[in-house]
Image (tube, rainbow, N blue to C red):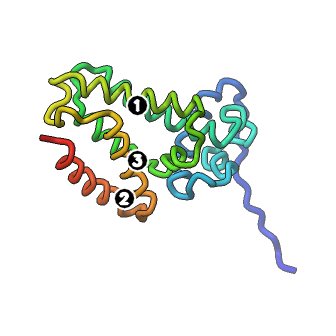
């Protein structure tokens, strides 16, 4: 029998409730990366380990896989809403940010395919996204050169098609493929 060397990592000091906000942020960052690399079926304990927290912390913040997936969506929507709150922001800027987010977390759009469309949490996310798009489509100065008559639903469908394609694209090629798709959408949606 050889000597067994045990590798240990330093134990983190338990900061209790003071660490809650930081743990939540770390879990969301870890979840985005884990979903992008491993898909929606990634083991939850991998998300917790990547975030540097215990499974108890994970489940206190997100009691289910669906809860953390929806939280990632909501965080992305919060970013989009903050952008749209700036009255000088344009639809083109909104679409660019949406495309960037899709490259990062395209796999999450599988949720729209497999989920019950009557789920009020999912319906709420879709309604928020439509509201953002509708706001920019309704304002001539924000719409820019996007064709009149283009609807939020059409943009949402285009974004979903891009996400489906990116889910089949190797991670290293996603940004390039997304750029090409954006070019196609410019031809379809813009004057």
Residue 28: x, y in percent?
A: 55, 39
Q: Which residue is mark 1?
A: 129
- State whether residue 44 appears in this view: yes
Q: For this rendering, which residue is in front, 112 or 108?
A: 112
Give the alpha-carbon distance from disc 1 to disc 3, as whole Å.
Answer: 12 Å
Q: Residue at x 16, y 41 (%)?
A: 190
Q: For this rendering, which residue is in front, 154 or 108?
A: 154
Q: Which residue is mark 3?
A: 160
Q: Residue at x 58, y 43 (%)?
A: 115
- State whether residue 27 appears in this view: no
Residue 183: x, y in percent?
A: 21, 52
For marks 1 and 2 on the same chain, the one whose residue lies earlier in the sequence: 1
For marks 1 and 3 on the same chain, the one whose residue lies earlier in the sequence: 1
- Disc 1: CA contacts within 10 A as few (<14), some (14-19) or many (>=20): some
Q: Which residue is mark 2?
A: 174
Q: Residue at x 64, y 29 (%)?
A: 19
Residue 79: x, y in percent?
A: 40, 30
Q: Residue at x 70, y 29 (%)?
A: 15
Q: Which SS class for mark 1? A: helix
């Amino acid at each position: 029998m050889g000597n067994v060397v045990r590798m240990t990592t330093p134990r983190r000091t338990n900061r209790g409730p003071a660490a809650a906000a930081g743990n939540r942020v770390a879990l969301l960052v870890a979840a985005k990366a884990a979903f992008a690399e491993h898909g929606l079926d990634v083991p939850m304990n991998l998300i917790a380990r990547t975030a540097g927290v215990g499974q108890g912390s994970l489940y206190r913040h997100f009691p289910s896989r669906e809860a953390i997936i929806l939280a990632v969506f909501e965080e992305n929507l919060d970013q989009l809403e903050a952008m749209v709150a700036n009255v000088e922001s344009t639809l083109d800027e909104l679409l660019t940010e949406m495309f960037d987010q899709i490259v990062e977390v395209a796999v999450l759009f599988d949720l729209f395919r497999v989920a019950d469309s009557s789920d009020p949490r999912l319906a709420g996310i879709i309604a928020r996204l439509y509201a953002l798009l509708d706001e920019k489509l309704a304002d001539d100065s924000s719409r820019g050169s996007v064709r009149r008559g283009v609807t939020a639903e059409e943009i949402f469908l285009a974004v979903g098609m891009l996400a489906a394609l990116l889910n089949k694209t190797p991670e290293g090629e996603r940004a390039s493929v997304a750029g090409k798709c954006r070019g196609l959408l410019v031809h379809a949606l813009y004057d």
